Image (cartoon, helix red, strand yellow):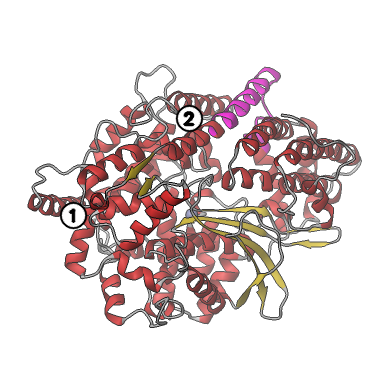
Amino acid sequence: MSQTIDANDTNPLLDMLDAHRLPDFAEIRAEHAEPAVETLIADARRAVDRAIAESMDEASWATIVEPIDAAGDRLERGFSPVSHLHSVMNSPAWREAYQACLPKLTAFATEMGQNSQLFEAIKRLHDDPAAFARLNEAQQRVVSRMLRDFELAGVALDASDKTRFAEIQQRLSELSTTFQQNLLDASQAWSQHVTDESELAGLPASARALLAQNAANKDLDGWRVTLDAPSFIAVLTYADNRALRESVYRAFSTRASDTGPNGGEFDNSALMDEILALRHESAQLLGFANYADKSLAKKMADSPAEIETFLLDLADRTKDQARAELAEIAEWARKDGVDEIAAWDVGYYAEKIKEDRYDYADEDLRPYFPAPEVIDGLFRVVQRLYNVDIVALDDIPTWHADVTVYEIRDTDGSPRGTFYLDPYAREGKRGGAWMDGFQSRRVHADGVQLPVAFLTCNFSPPIGDDPALLTHNEVTTLFHEFGHGLHHMLTRVDYAPIAGISGVEWDAVELPSQFMENWCWERESLDLFAAHYNTGEKLPADLFDKLYASRNHMAGWQMLRQVEFSLFDLRLHRDFEPTSATSILDTLAEVRNEVAVMQPPVFNRFPHSFQHVFAGGYAAGYYSYKWAEVLSADAFAAFEETALFDGATGKRFLTEVLERGATRDAMENFVAFRGREPSIDALLRHSGLGGDRAA
Ligand SMILES: [Zn+2]
């Protein structure tokens, strides 16, 4: 990329680091990224060399672990704004900057992971009984984890295998970036311009207003349907126009693939094959049979077989219910003259059945969920549960006018952490919702660095002069992501590698997030914020009762879908054979034959947009959602047994789970909170699947 920064210019990505300031988003430009990363890598290399030299005489926390961690922390803080802006303000300039940085960072990470001298220095500390005994328990855990991670980075390989392993890492990081970019491009390449309002029959006023706003943003009359979540969900849920539903479904379910309206243009097919092959090869280099086995080194589950048994058991318990749900959908569709239901009919008739049975539409709830009130209500829920205050910070630069910065404080006013909340869908922003750390809690020479998080959602934006009005599902997503945020920010652990979410077994990471969702389903918590945006009237009792009664509407269907995705991901990474002719789509078809109650159309290319697995941290780990839901449902049951805001139970969850990070195994945290190991009963009960286990 073009270098427009010379050595004498200041670089906002670097200037903030030593002062431990928040990023100056008003000043950060794409051209700052590459020089900052180059400087930070060079600094880190020098710090590592110095630490290795100084730990020759005595390997201690101060000579080896602290300096290595400090260098890694600087690099993380310098690069995370780059990575974040690339995700939420995507543009050609940020793309170029990100792509320029990534190979350097990947190469450096591999170089560190395979640095034998560094490994030996840390091993000397670990193996010296006197020195190791001087470390506190958390420090000992950091050291043991570092040794494990060196092994997983190939430190023990011979020179030629090290080279191959490094090549693979390099290529994998490139592939996952391209996967994500193809997906974003494909999502934005498609839209449908509607000029005749009758084609939008069935769509609620809010959805029409959103589509009209989408059109106006492009200087078009009429309405513009896009593949942003608020738009495509509205069409698939409400549009009476079956052809419109099909058209949106076709575009959405074929994104970044060889089929559909943009087929072949942003095709991820070859990338996915290569990703799987390279993951397999890297696992084998390390001595694992397959990538699934390798990934278990950092998980609660013991074996792929244990995970598969868990998933198939859920499928068995769910299938009959899902079949019944689908049969009812088919029956409703027949009344409209649809003899054979298609994938684009399911959401539509599911909503019709819900409206009939429970006598309300999702849309009816929206006026009671104005985003500013919901966000404020979330904070009040958290305040009551964990006795912390959350206040907005003014005058902190951000990357977009929609973003607000907040601080979490103890009741005595002392800060615990900071977060940026970026709630609404917009062009150039990656889809989905997620929490990312800018920095982790860690002690350093000048004090304690407090955690900072980026919370990103893609909610329905405000329309006209009204506040954004959220669906209940969006409210639940906000609580979910904030659960991740609390895990990151409320930690008391002083060492970044095991503070907050860092170092937590991946299949336990969804515990704090799914746990928080429960407060979106209770009268007492909803009363803290659900009020009509015009009249201030609280959510009426009968509407709440209907919402609550419909909680498990289509629960069998939803559960089976999650099981299908999880099994597919697990088998892709467990059963990969370099010489096999079985394709990714074959594996998916086999899984669907086994667990699905309805086959999607042949053009469906779900895997091509499965970014959790092909471009995120969930490879061989998508099952984590269901796995951790056993934990989160059972954890919430502790409040069902006492009270929704029971002080002692909240405090116990705070101190035994949220504040602990990875200083203990996730199972130990859970047992310390609950007094016993988790039981699946609460999950089954909450899903309406009965709580007793069949013999
Ligand atoms: Zn999550």
Tell me: residue 682, above or below residue 531: above
Please indicate whether residue 441 sits to the left or right of residue 372 in the image: right
| Label 2 – label 1 distance at C-alpha | 37 Å
Q: Kindly identify the residue that appears in the image at 90 percent across and 37 percent down.
A: 53
Query: Hey, which quadrant is residue 662 in on the image?
Result: bottom right
- In the rendering, at what x and y percent does residue 213 appear? 42, 54
**Residue 353 percent coordinates (x, y):** 18, 60
Q: Point out residue 338 in the picture as x, y percentages from the top left corner.
A: 11, 45
Q: Which residue is mark 2?
A: 290
Tell me if 199 is positioned left or right of 371 in this view: left
**In the image, is residue 7 part of the stretch drawn in magenta?**
no
Relative to residue 633, is residue 91 depicted above or below?
Answer: above
Q: Are marks 2 and 1 in contact (CB under 8 Å)?
A: no
* Residue 414 left/right relative to 568: right
Question: Which label sits on residue 136?
Answer: none
Mark 1, secondary structure of its residue: helix
Crowding near the residue tagged with mark 1, few <14, some 14–19, many ≥20 C-alpha atoms within 10 Å: many
Which element type, helix, strand or loop, lies under badge 2? loop
Q: Magenta span: helix, strand or loop, mainly?
A: helix
Q: Tell me which numbered mark, 2 or 1, is placed earlier along the sequence.
A: 2
Q: Amino acid at mark 1?
A: Glu
Query: Which residue does the image show at 41% across and 46% down from the upper left?
Result: 220
Query: Is 164 within the magenta?
Result: yes
Quarter the C terminus occupies: bottom left
Q: Amino acid at mark 2?
A: Asn
Residue at the spot of label 1:
325
For the question of whether residue 318 can be seen, the reply is no
Q: Name which residue lies at 75% across and 31% down.
A: 115
Q: Is residue 226 left or right of residue 76?
A: left
Residue extent of the magenta highlight: 150-176
Whether residue 576 can be seen here:
yes
Tell me the mark number nearer the camera, choosing from 2 and 1. 1
